[in-house]
Structure formats: C-alpha cells, structure tokens
Amino acid sequence: MATEAEALTNDWGGGVHPYRVGHRKLGMWLFIMSDSLTFSALLIAYAYVRASNVWPTPFKFYPSIVFSSVMTLVLLSSSLTMVFAVSASAKRQLAAARKWIIATAVLGATFIVLHAIEWKHLIDEGLTPFALPHEWAEKWPGATPLFGATFFGITGMHMFHVFTGCIYLLVVAARVKKASHEDVEISGLYWHFVDLVWMFVFPMIYLLSIGI
Amino acid sequence: MSAHTESHDEHFAGSNKLFISIWIWLLVLTGIEVFFGYIHLPVIYMLVILMGASIIKAALIVAYFMHLRFERLPLVLTIVPAVVVCICLLLVFFPDSFRSRDLRTAPPPTAPPTGQPSH
C-alpha cells in the first residue's frame, strides 16, 4: 500500500489530491472546457454554412487584415503581461502583479477599440447580420446573407469575453492584496483562454476570407 | 521520494525567458499564417496549414501560458481528451453540408423521371 507521499510522486497513484489544484481553479478549468465547446460549435456551424454556400471573400489588406493582425499582436502581448502578473504574484510581489494585471486589461481594452473600428468599417460598407452590402452581392452572385450573422456572431461573442475579462482583471487588480495567488492564476487561465479562442477565430474568419 | 513534492503550491514553474520565447513563437506562427493567407493555394491546403498552425499555437498557450504542462497528469487527462473528442464529434455534420453544396451545384434534371405522368 503506497503512502500518500508516494502516491503524489506517481501520476497514476492519484492519492487524495489527484489534481493538486484548488476547487476554484478546477472550476475555472471546467468552465473553460464548456466554453471551448461553445466556441467550437459556433466555428463548426460557420464552417458548415460556408462549405455549403457561395461565400464572399471581401477582406482587404487595409483595413481588415491590418487591423486583425494588430489585434492578434495586442492579444498575444496581453497574454505575456498576464504571465508576468502571475509570476510576480507567485513571488508575492503584489505591486508588480497589480501593474501587470492592469497592463493586461489595458491591452484587452485596446483590442476591443481596434475591433470596434474594424466593425465600423464593415458596417459603413453596408454589412448587417442578415444582409450583404449591394457591392458584395453583385460581386459574388448567389452568396448567402449569413456572412454577417457568422461574422458578427462569432467575433461579437469573442469581444464579449474580452470585455468581461477586462472587468474581471480590474476586479482582481483592485483586490490583489486580499486575493490569494491562486485567484490571480485563475484570472490568468480565463484570459489565456480568450487569447486561445482568437487563435482560431483570426484564421477562420479573417485569413480564409481575404479578397483576391 | 518525500512529502516535499506537495509543498509547491506557491511555486510557479517556468522562467520569464521561457515565456518570452513562447510569445515570439506565437508571433512567428501568426506571421506565417498571414503570409499563407496571401498565397493562393486550394482551400483544402489553406485549411490544413492554418488549422495546423492554430492547433500548435493553442497547444503552446495551454501548455505554457495556462501552465498545464506543469500540472499533474491526472488533471491534463481529465481536461484535454474529453474536449478534443467532443470537438471532433461535431465534425459529423459536414457530410450534410457537402450534400447541400452538391444539390446547389448539380445540373437541373433534363427529363422527368420515367413512369411518372408529365403535366
């Protein structure tokens, strides 16, 4: 019969703490599992309608691809600042942790502003959730009007996650002295997940719809 | 083989240098994706390249930024396979998508089927 200490050194032993994470961190992982299925379902539904229809490929280098690439850079950088925040929090350097968390939230807000500008370009062209701009409808005869629905639906859902993430991070930054290290780490898990989702949204929505 | 393995709760594995190098890899892969966006390959190759790069990026984020590589194996085995299997199961809908595409692109029937009275 293995002792608990032996069980913990052996991954198959399990022991009484098979996961060695707190209940809150496990809860965040379970939430991330369910949310990743939500986004997968949205992206698969998008791929389904795209594969069965004439699909417009309207994105120009400027503004759409430039904006979305810069947004990717901003989001990846915000993940790096979040890692620095968690690393500072692990060393109990709380002032530094707070500074990095706020930097992450600022980068998140930058992402939202850039995305809003990018949305506005398309809305000004005449794209709505259930109709294509006239110019697109002429260029791609018979194209499905669902382009707008999938575009605004998926990027809007992602933007909502970034928005809630910014609020979450600001709350954690404000409470960083009361919060445990694990609380900071959990907010980091959520933020990295939002980044991860964008790694699929960016190529599927933007890069596969570049106008030739 | 002692109990000290359990006393690592506040320990955060991985150096800042490691995380910066992961960030650079993610940027490089993003650059490659944008580059391929402008090379006019058949859509199937584009999908394989873009999804391949995205899966690598996702794996880097989950393993290093989300720290899963440094967690206990049972946690990894609880989280990852279930999500991957569920996502793959969503792909069962695609034959129907291709069927609707083929219906749209198929030429219209030229003669009514035999044995049916024509109006």
Image: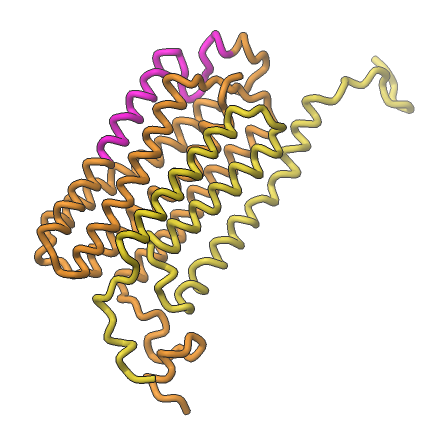
Residue B16's place in the image compared with B76, above or below, is: above
Q: Colour of chain B?
A: yellow
Instruction: Report x, y in % for residue A20.
Output: 31, 70
Q: Quadrant of the N terminus of chain A?
A: bottom left
Instruction: Report x, y in % for residue A34.
Output: 40, 51
Residue A41's place in the image compared with B117, above or below, is: below
Instruction: Report x, y in % for residue A36.
Output: 41, 47
A109 sits to left or right of B24: left
Instruction: State the predominant SS element of the stretch in magenta.
Output: helix
A110 sits to left or right of A176: right
Residue plotted at (29% across, 20% down): A117
**Quick one: which chain is orange?**
A
Residue plotted at (33% across, 21% down): A118
* Residue A128 is one of the magenta-drawn residues: yes
B99 sits to left or right of A9: right
Residue A7's place in the image compared with A160, above or below, is: below
* Residue A110 is one of the magenta-drawn residues: yes
B36 sits to left or right of A101: right
Residue A28's place in the image compared with A151, above or below, is: below
Q: Quadrant of residue A180?
A: bottom left
Residue furthest out toward the right: B115
**Coloration mode:** by chain
Q: Nearer the viewer, residue B49 or A172?
A: B49
Instruction: Report x, y in % for residue A3.
Output: 35, 88
Number of numbered discs present?
0
* Magenta span: A108-136
Residue furthest out toward the bottom: A1
Residue plotted at (34% across, 12% down): A124
Residue plotted at (37% across, 18% down): A63
